[in-house]
Amino acid sequence: MNNWGRNIRLSIFGESHGQGIGIVIDGLPGGIKLDVEKIEAEMERRAPGRSNISTSRSEADKVEILSGFVGGMTTGTPIAGIIRNTNTISKHYEKDLLRPGHADYTAYMKYGEHRDYRGGGHFSARITAPLVFAGAVAKQVLNAEGVSVGAHILKIADVEDEPFDPVNIGEKELSEVSKKSFPVIDDKKGELMKQRILTAKSELNSVGGIAECAVVGMPAGKGEPFFGSVESRVSSLIYSVPAVKAVMFGAGCGFAGMTGKDANDEFYVSGGKIKTYTNNNGGINGGITNGMPIIFRAVLKPTPSIAQKQRTVNIAKMENAEIEVRGRHDPCIVHRGTVVIENAANIAMLDLLYDKF
């Protein structure tokens, strides 16, 4: 079953070139006021066809809320949202030629010859739009509870942005970077990133990168040891985002080169609260929040749809073949993917916030 969540439960559906894509959100109590304009603004951040560094496929990504929402308030029953597909060109896709880096072969092995191969079907990154809708809903609930989530592009190709300050990052900084159409801290580095993307595009190629996400305001004591850890639950949703191939919390891979003295976050008391001088563990100890900012990074691979000639297989003939992927594709998914990562984190944080002791 295509479901996720303990307290906030999600079920996602649709295909890239089908009639629509959508999500069902269960577990929200009734009486929560939702600002539809804020939801639309969040959808606009991820939407395709907005610049020359994104796919030229233009979709409004307008969400129709079908249930669980009346008079601007949640009713307590499942919220169903659907986004109609309006700009598809299915002739660009060949059923029998397996696109390298895509799920064409694995989809064939799981679903057989009747799979929806158009635009990647249910495996398409387009299916992240419903996740952003769910995240936009979760964001409003979190903000009312004093919790803020934000993300920025940390790296594209060989160009790196400034990282978040893991100890002192605050709601203001997260809000400011999230408002940018190209979410980076250093706008000069952002321009260099855009140049790298356009260079890859001109070479019929693509580039990948890293999104960094921070959460502030989460109370200490959320999460559970082992299988219910914050890392486990957040990662399970972040890894559901197509192109994500690694998730790291706090110092991440940097721990491998540290000693225990370097890695440990020493405690102190300030204003009646226990804090840490450093935040190598990304706000999590033993799978449970410690009250410091939660910091994680997600690595997104280069978009696999490139127009260069590649070797492949014709699955119908079981013969070696060549392919040049046609269609409208992002030369880099990181800038739009960062919005998805941020909203997936919104969902995960709300699920954790609703945990009962």
Image: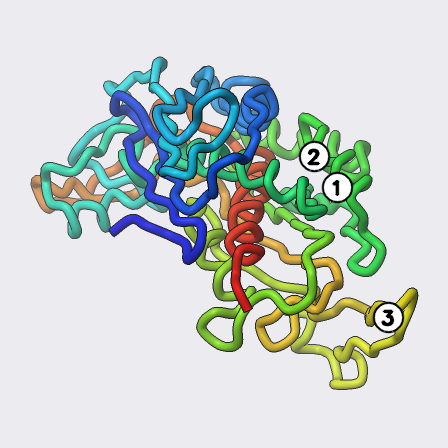
Q: Residue furthest right?
A: 271
Sequence-earlier tag: 1 or 3: 1
Q: Element at badge 1?
A: helix
**Picture disc at residue 178:** 2
Residue 308 visible somewhere in the drawing? no
Q: CA distance from mark 1 to mark 3?
A: 21 Å
The residue indicated by pointer 1 is 174
Asked if the residue under mark 2 is in contact with the one under mark 3, i.e. CB atoms within 8 Å, the reply is no
Q: Position of residue 92 (x, y in %)?
A: 28, 22
What is the number of callouts on the image?
3
The residue indicated by pointer 3 is 277
Mark 3 crowd level (few <14, some 14–19, many ≥20, 10 Å Cα) = few
Q: Which quarter of the rendering shows the C terminus? A: bottom right
Residue type highlighted by circle 3: Tyr
Q: Element at badge 2?
A: helix
**Camera-side residue: 63 or 270?**
270
In the visual, does 261 lie left or right of 4?
A: right
Picture quarter containing residue 282? Answer: bottom right
Vertical order, 44 against 112 (above or below): above
Q: State the residue at coordinates (29%, 36%).
A: 13
Q: Element at badge 3?
A: loop
Picture quarter containing residue 130? Answer: top left
In the visual, does 24 lie left or right of 218?
A: left
Q: State the residue at coordinates (35%, 28%).
A: 67
Vertical order, 167 against 193 (above or below): below
Q: State the residue at coordinates (75%, 41%).
A: 174
Q: Position of residue 151 (x, y in %)?
A: 66, 43
